Image (cartoon, rainbow, N blue to C red):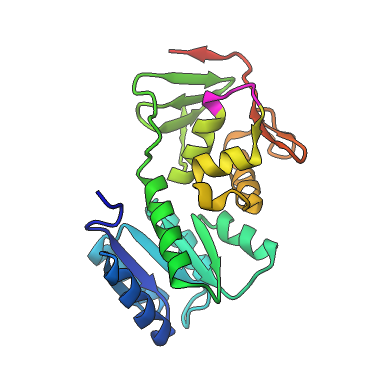
Amino acid sequence: MSVNNNKKILIIEDEQKLVRLLKTNFESVGFEVYSADNAKSGLAAMTLTSPDLIILDVMLPDEDGITLCRKIREISDIPIIILTAKVRESDKLLGFESGADDYITKPFSSAELIARVKAVLRRSEGKNNTPKDTELLLGNLRISFARRKVYKNDQEIKLTPTEFQLLYHLAINHDRVMLHEELLKLVWGPEYQSEVEYLRAYIWRLRRKIEDDPAHPQIIVSNLGIGYSCCTPNLLRS
């Protein structure tokens, strides 16, 4: 079954020519498409339509997309792809830090955006053969594979689907260096294998959530220029 069967996309974008183009292209491959032209109506449309993915422009007439992305993340882990004309890495990091799952710069091809949408939807569905009856204890961090939840000192840490996927692959390969390209293929898909900044941004986000001191990580350790490894103090399995 195609990943886009019965999937709904909400486009929050005030450039109507672009909205019409995206709507036509997404509908041609089987998506159901809704749109809103500002942040306020975008939030209302999200509640009314319950979309499977949001495409969000950074520049909106009533509120910037980064702020709106943060608001959405407070109430939902729905996948979000940010559209922007900004290309600086610091802007991308800001987008990821706000909770976005992907970041596409204008101009872009419709084929590229559709491919990215499908990849993000695949990740959000968690198709990774996660063990159903296993927990992993890394110091004060507990990962429940069955429930797809993470706890630190017995307090649940909210992770997005992509963040969980990344931690999952690092954890099940604990004490082994995972190459940048390897992690990108496993978590994001083969079309992302050269997007090292994605990985760097998500590692940064993940460390902020799970490490006692993100500036001096003890769980997710960098191997400079090569990749990352998950160290396992007091490793326990159940």
Q: Residue at the spot x=48%, y=65% of the render?
A: 112
**Quadrant for the C terminus in the image:** top left
Total marks placed: 0
| Left or right of residue 174, residue 116 in this image | left
Residue 176 on image: x %, y % = 64, 24
Residue 8 on image: x %, y % = 27, 62
Above or below for 147 versus 125: above
Q: Residue at the spot x=26%, y=60% of the render?
A: 50
Majority secondary structure of the magenta segment?
loop
The reply to whether the magenta stretch includes residue 173 is yes
Residue 227 visible in the shown view: yes
Residue 133 on image: x %, y % = 35, 19
The reply to whether the magenta stretch includes residue 7 is no
Q: What segment is highlighted magenta in the picture?
A: 171-176
Above or below for 143 versus 4: above
Above or below for 174 versus 9: above
Q: Closer to the camera, 198 or 139?
A: 198
Q: Closer to the camera, 116 or 167?
A: 116
Q: Residue furthest bottom?
A: 17
Residue 204 on image: x %, y % = 64, 45
| Left or right of residue 113, residue 196 in this image | right
User: Based on the displayed image, in which of its 4 quarters is residue 13 positioned?
Assistant: bottom left
